[in-house]
Amino acid sequence: MYAYLMKKKSFKTKYSLAEVALFIIFAFSLLAGHLLVIRRQAIKLSKPHVLDFAGVSVSVPAGEGWSSHGSWQFYNDDSDIMLTAQLSVKGNIVAVVQWRYVIAPEKTTTFRLLSKRAAVGGADKIKTGQYSVKNALIEWAHAKVPGGIRDVFFGVAYLGNERAIEIEAMAPSDPELAKQIFAKVCKSLKYEPNELIKKGEKYIASVKDAGVASLIERDTSLSWERVYIFDRPEKDASGYLLEVFNEEAEAEDKKVIQSDTRSYIAHGDNWIKKDTFFKCDDRFDTFFQQTRIERSDNAKVPITVIEQTSDGVLKGVSEAFLKDKYYEPGKNAVPEILLDSILASFIGCEYDEMIVDIVRGECLIVPAFVSKLSEMQARQLDKRAMYGIRVEHLDAKKKFDEILFDENKQIIRKIRKNLHVHSWERSDRGTLIEKFKIK
């Protein structure tokens, strides 16, 4: 009886395993069938997704099974702006497409860049080609993971103004589907050269020629110090920003500007302090910045160091990063700590608007649309104002600063609008000491 039961149990076990195997085969057959049907169908594309102020629009696959964020997204990990779509069948992701607008691309050949992209995924290039679209040339490579089934298609187009756009498509179980998707989305790229970035390049070049030291002197009335105070009693919120600059002669024909900046913002019992040391040459072609942050909850915030060297490479180091960051900023780039100093001269500039790339202390490069306010618009914000400039940060929607100037083109007030509105009034050291009891 025991032998009979064991034999019966063994039969049932074998039968169950066979059922499982048949189920797996059936599931893969269904998936393969779905992929075959998808491949034979015409790949439909979404409406063009326009990237504001970049002169770029692209499409991604759309229709049954495809999903995406629906808009370009700025990513803090690498300062790139991305648009992604994925295809799911029976709950499994079977294809992915990703556009990447690169703000500060590596200055290298397309061939080397494609080889580098393939190597990151452990793949080898097996084929290359080109797609010509209006005002741009996409050079691409088909890469395959040795011994695996994963095929990836990479493409890159170097645009004007030291920008680039990359495209990647992958369908792990169906290389032919990936190839079809890649070809279709590549041809959706439309690019128009961006005059706003060119204007930003020309303006920053004029600022470098004038030297940032002279601009700091003018805005600070030779005091080499700026104080802003933020106060909202009704919200139990307050804060200050103290910027102290000084100039040194490093060599006979070379100036070095240093800055020690302290900021403090409190909301009730919660506060955050930031100390920043900054050093640059008069043209800010090279600079060094170190940022320390303290919080009321004693949470540890890693120190962040960024440095741009004479070869034009910007490096960011912090324990908060998964790895060190490297960028090659364009000619329109300016460290955020110098932005106030260079905006006053924009009032008299021939341009009414431009795009500059702001290098932030957390090692992000964020494009910003800079435009002049009319005198009426400036006065509506502050009756003392004669001039105003709006800086729209393109890493987040509805995030912008409005900087207001008096008749002498000195900043009197800064308004930052994001999730909240903070108004920073220009003040002096005496008021700062009296209100916040600092040394």
Image (cartoon, rainbow, N blue to C red):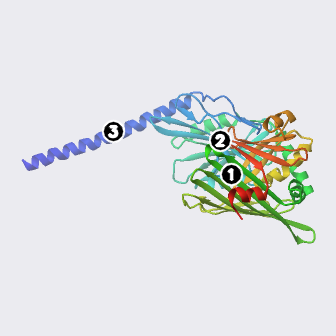
Q: Is residue 194 left or right of residue 175?
A: right
Residue highlighted by disc 2: 420
**Which residue occupies 72% across, 52% down?**
111
Residue 204 numbered mark, or none: none
- Look at discs 3 and 1 and give the one toward the viewer: 1
- Look at discs 2 and 3 and give the one toward the viewer: 2
SS at mark 2 in the image: loop
Among the two numbered marks 1 and 2 on one chain, the one whose residue lies closer to the N terminus: 1
Question: How busy is the neighbourhood of tag 3: few (under 14 within 10 Å), some, or many (20 plus)?
Answer: few
| x and y percentages locating residue 87 in the rendered image | 53, 36
- Marks 2,3: beta carbons within 8 A: no
SS at mark 3 in the image: helix
User: Of 145 and 412, which appears nearest the observer?
Assistant: 412
Could you tell me if residue 87 is visible in this image? Answer: yes
User: Of 177 and 411, which appears nearest the observer?
Assistant: 411
Residue highlighted by disc 3: 22
Say what amino acid the circle numbered 1 marks.
Answer: Leu
Residue highlighted by disc 1: 114
Question: How busy is the neighbourhood of tag 2: few (under 14 within 10 Å), some, or many (20 plus)?
Answer: few
Among the two numbered marks 2 and 3 on one chain, the one whose residue lies closer to the N terminus: 3
Q: CA distance from mark 2 to mark 3?
A: 59 Å
**Which residue occupies 86% across, 60% down?**
223
User: Of 226 and 156, which appears nearest the observer?
Assistant: 226
